[in-house]
Image (cartoon, rainbow, N blue to C red):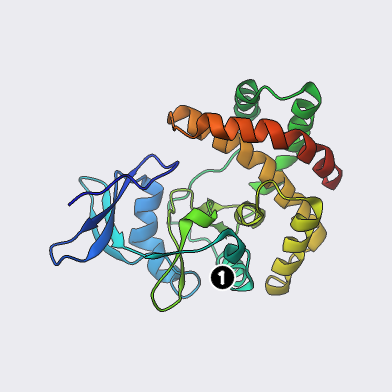
């Protein structure tokens, strides 16, 4: 029995279904090469570092994955907790295997300009977004592993309490800030961003909190471009709701956060 599509932004269809034994499982189809490769090659080596749903079956012809159903949601407050920061720091420290397939994260000028044409922000805010984009290269030149999509909706908890991160279609390499930015509620403030950077640095002692806070702010701005373009290109129903929210909150956030650059 097929259920509703649980995907909010992804290209693949995600359904909660019953397997032949009547157990609830997740079927995701068609998945990207990045996510298919993650479950085939990276999930097992990384299981001692960060938990992902158990792979029950992979169909290479349909490009489908049948995955463990993780029943309990994790709140926005919980994803910024020490347990998850610790797990993410261990992922970020894990050496990237050259044979794995990675999503290529970038922030091109053309992508920014397309998102700005959709957002229709005040001129000052547009100029500030261009400053963020020009400084944003530092996010993508780093070599540590990242999930690429750590928002609260991609976390769940098993019956035994384990925190599990699913949706690995943006698995790649880059700054830890890319994974930390979604843990800050909304756009965040300079204070909340700096506080998260400091707490993360307790687990990742090689990081400098000031530099990381700057990169989290850059990642926050970059994610705006990513979200707007994804929702627009995939014709998602949330598109106009997000546009309205960004138009209301981005200008003030940019005025405050530009001082982090």
The residue carrying mark 1 is 87
* 30 displayed left or right of 50: left
Q: Is residue 90 above or below residue 260?
A: below
Closest to the observer, 249 or 254: 249
In the picture as drawn, the residue positioned furthest to the bottom comes out as 160
Residue drawn at point x = 46 percent, y = 28 percent: 233
Q: Relative to residue 156, is residue 129 depicted above or below?
A: above
**Label 1: few (<14), some (14–19) or many (≥20) C-alpha neighbours in 10 Å:** some
Q: Is residue 114 visible?
A: yes
Asked which quadrant contains residue 113, the reply is: top right
Percent x, y of residue 126: 75, 26
Q: Is residue 232 left or right of residue 21?
A: right
Label 1: which secondary element: helix
Which residue is depicted at the point 20% across and 46% down?
Answer: 61
Q: Position of residue 235 (x, y in %)?
A: 43, 28
Q: Position of residue 153 (x, y in %)?
A: 49, 54
Please identify the residue farthest to the left as the structure is shown. Answer: 20
The reply, left or right, for residue 20 in relation to residue 91 is left
Q: Name the residue furthest right.
A: 259
Residue drawn 77% across the image and 50% down it: 189
| Total marks placed | 1
Decide if residue 107 is in sight here. no
Q: Residue 13 appears at what percent x and percent y?
A: 32, 43
Q: Nearer the viewer, residue 133 or 188?
A: 188
The C terminus sits in image quarter: top right
Q: Residue at x 56, y 43 (%)?
A: 105
């Amino acid at each position: 029995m097929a259920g509703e599509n649980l995907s909010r932004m992804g290209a693949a269809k995600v359904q909660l279904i019953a397997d032949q034994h009547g157990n609830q499982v997740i079927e995701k189809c068609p998945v990207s090469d990045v996510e298919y490769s993650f479950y085939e090659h990276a999930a097992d080596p990384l299981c001692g570092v960060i938990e992902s749903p158990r792979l029950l079956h992979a169909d290479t012809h349909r490009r489908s994955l049948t995955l463990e159903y993780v029943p309990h949601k994790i709140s926005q407050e919980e994803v910024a907790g020490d347990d998850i920061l610790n797990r993410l720091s261990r992922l970020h420290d894990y050496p990237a295997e050259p044979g794995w397939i990675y999503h290529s994260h970038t922030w091109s000028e053309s992508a920014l300009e397309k998102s700005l044409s959709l957002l229709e922000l005040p001129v000052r805010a547009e100029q500030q977004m261009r400053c963020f984009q020009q400084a944003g290269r530092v996010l993508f030149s780093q070599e540590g592993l990242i999930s690429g999509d750590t928002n609260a909706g991609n976390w769940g908890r098993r019956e035994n309490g384990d925190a599990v991160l699913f949706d690995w279609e943006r698995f790649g390499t880059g700054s830890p800030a890319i994974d930390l930015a979604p843990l800050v509620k909304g756009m965040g403030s300079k204070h909340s961003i700096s506080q998260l950077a400091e707490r993360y640095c307790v687990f990742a002692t090689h990081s400098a909190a000031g530099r990381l806070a700057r990169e989290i702010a850059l990642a926050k701005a970059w994610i705006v471009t990513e979200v707007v373009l994804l929702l627009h290109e995939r014709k998602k129903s949330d598109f106009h709701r997000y546009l309205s929210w960004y138009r209301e909150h981005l200008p003030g956030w940019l005025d405050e956060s530009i001082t982090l650059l």
